[in-house]
């Protein structure tokens, strides 16, 4: 439990704060190396001549100020921050009496290198790496030309560490970009799959309506001479079915575009067993059946109907049910809840308002246990509602749990189912 709670805390620490902590840790390590600690006969490293003098302490204080300033800039201006941290590393090394910039003084620079490599474009990351390498090599060159001792081994260790953290940063960036690309592609596939599903359902609706038209036309032809009243009734049914089908096609196909590559996307994931035993073309009238079958999956569904029931156009009736069906399926698969509430509000004659909400996981039944899906069902629902020019929202409830709401407009004069 402590490890889980510690992870969000670590994520809240910004790169700038990590750089400041790295500098202070390196400064503390440098001081400890030059002190005789308990159990030691003498200090690991002899202090430089000016290390404890006023000029040495002044240089360390200025270097610390530069490092803290660079840490503050790292989140907003990483390249400028790297320059401050490199200057601090060089200045902080002068009073130590060392032959190369120590690794302890380069820890904050390593943090900046990783941050730039992981978050900035390739050219900027490469310039940062060259700058960091150039400072170390330049420091060695100046000492060599001045005839001073050069700490080649120390410099190699510093450069190797800097190269490693830079490569790790680039690897993290590539992984993140790949994950973002994968999520975007999966979301796009979910949208295409939902559109294809809508197109198949529209095809079934049109085929059913045309079948009715054909039957009524045949009946009218047979009785038009002997029973004109029956013929008029059949023609009325033909007119109603034709208007109904045409209105649905105009609403849906006006926004539905053909996918670029219909063979690429796969069918949407199958429903859970609890919600699969339903008609091929269901509507809001099938809600009670949906609630009964969902109960077999361990989730109790309470259906609330607000307002007087009224017939709806087939495409809106079907889309409303699909939104509710997918929402309930998400509760079964991912929420960890043992119950949910489905509300259908028909009080507004121009809108169908839908709400599905759950109270959240029950003790001993977590999202990780019952979940594991991709979550792209929400993408499909949003696409379906958007094609009907409706409004869709989904997110956590203030008191816990999850809520999905959708408002589907009913065009004035639309033919009912």
Image (tube, grey):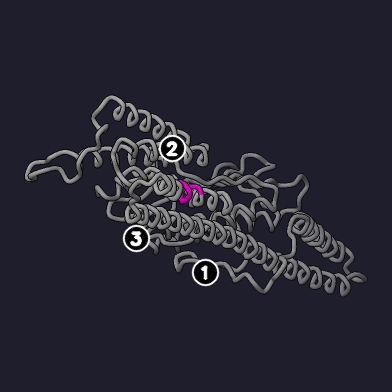
User: Which one is nearer the viewer's eye here, 355 or 52?
Assistant: 52
Marks 1/3: CA distance?
Answer: 19 Å
* Residue 196 place in picture, x, y as percent: 67, 66
User: Which one is nearer the viewer's eye here, 340 or 399?
Assistant: 399
Which secondary structure lies at badge 1?
loop
Q: Residue at x 90, y 71 (%)?
A: 226
Vertical order, 64 against 141 (above or below): above
Any mark on residue 369, and which? 3
* Residue 178 place in picture, x, y as percent: 53, 61
* Residue 312 place in picture, x, y as percent: 68, 52
* Residue 57 place in picture, x, y as percent: 29, 28
The chief SS type of the magenta part is helix
Marks 1/2: CA distance?
Answer: 60 Å
Which residue bears the numbered disc 2? 87
Q: Which residues are magenta?
A: 131-136
Q: Is residue 377 visible?
A: no
Q: If you read the primary sequence from the N terminus, does the residue marked by circle 3 or circle 2 appear first?
A: 2
Vertical order, 289 against 401 (above or below): below
Instruction: Check if residue 133 falls in the magenta segment.
Output: yes
Instruction: Left or right? Give the position of 182 relative to 212.
Output: left
Marks 3/2: CA distance?
Answer: 52 Å
Vertical order, 391 against 276 (above or below): above
User: Which one is nearer the viewer's eye here, 390 or 97?
Assistant: 97
Instruction: Check if residue 389 falls in the magenta segment.
Output: no
Which secondary structure lies at badge 3?
helix
User: Which one is nearer the viewer's eye here, 357 or 307?
Assistant: 357
Q: Residue at x 42, y 61 (%)?
A: 372
Choose mark 1 or mark 2, whichever is in front.
Answer: 2
Any mark on residue 270, and which? 1
Q: Is residue 353 visible?
A: yes
């Amino acid at each position: 439990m402590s490890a889980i709670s510690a992870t969000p805390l670590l994520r809240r620490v910004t790169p700038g704060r990590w750089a400041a902590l790295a500098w202070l840790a390196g400064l503390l390590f440098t001081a400890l190396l030059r002190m005789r600690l308990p159990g030691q006969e003498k200090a690991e490293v002899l202090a430089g001549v000016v290390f404890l003098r006023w000029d040495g302490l002044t240089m360390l204080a200025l270097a610390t100020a530069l490092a803290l300033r660079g840490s503050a800039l790292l989140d907003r201006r990483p390249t400028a921050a790297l320059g401050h941290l490199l200057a601090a590393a060089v200045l902080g090394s002068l009073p130590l009496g060392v032959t190369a910039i120590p690794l302890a003084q380069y820890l904050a620079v390593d943090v900046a290198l990783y941050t730039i490599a992981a978050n900035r474009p390739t050219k900027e990351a490469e310039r940062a790496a060259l700058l960091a390498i150039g400072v170390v090599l330049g420091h060695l060159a100046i000492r060599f030309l001045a005839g001073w001792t050069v700490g080649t081994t120390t410099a190699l260790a510093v450069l190797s560490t800097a190269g490693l953290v830079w490569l790790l940063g680039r690897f993290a960036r590539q992984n993140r970009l790949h994950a973002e690309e994968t999520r975007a592609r999966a979301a796009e596939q979910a949208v295409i799959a939902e559109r294809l599903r809508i197109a198949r359902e529209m095809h079934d609706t049109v085929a059913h309506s045309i079948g009715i038209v054909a039957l009524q036309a045949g009946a009218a032809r047979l009785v038009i001479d002997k029973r004109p009243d029956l013929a008029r009734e059949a023609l009325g049914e033909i007119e109603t079915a034709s208007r109904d089908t045409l209105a649905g096609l105009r609403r849906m196909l006006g926004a539905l575009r053909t996918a670029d590559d219909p063979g690429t996307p796969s069918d949407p994931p199958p429903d859970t067993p609890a919600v699969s035993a339903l008609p091929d073309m269901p509507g809001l009238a099938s809600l009670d059946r949906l609630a009964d079958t969902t109960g077999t999956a361990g989730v109790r569904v309470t259906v609330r109907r607000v307002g007087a029931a009224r017939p709806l156009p087939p495409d809106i009736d079907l889309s409303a049910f699909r939104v509710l069906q997918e929402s309930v399926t998400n509760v079964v698969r991912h929420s960890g809840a043992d119950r949910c509430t489905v509300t259908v509000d028909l009080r507004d004659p121009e809108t169908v308002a839908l709400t599905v909400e759950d109270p959240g996981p029950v003790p001993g039944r977590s999202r990780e246990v019952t979940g594991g899906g991709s979550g792209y069902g929400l993408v499909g629902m949003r696409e379906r509602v958007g094609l009907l020019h409706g409004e869709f929202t989904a997110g956590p409830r203030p008191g816990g749990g999850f809520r999905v709401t959708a408002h589907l407009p009913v065009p004035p004069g639309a033919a009912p189912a």
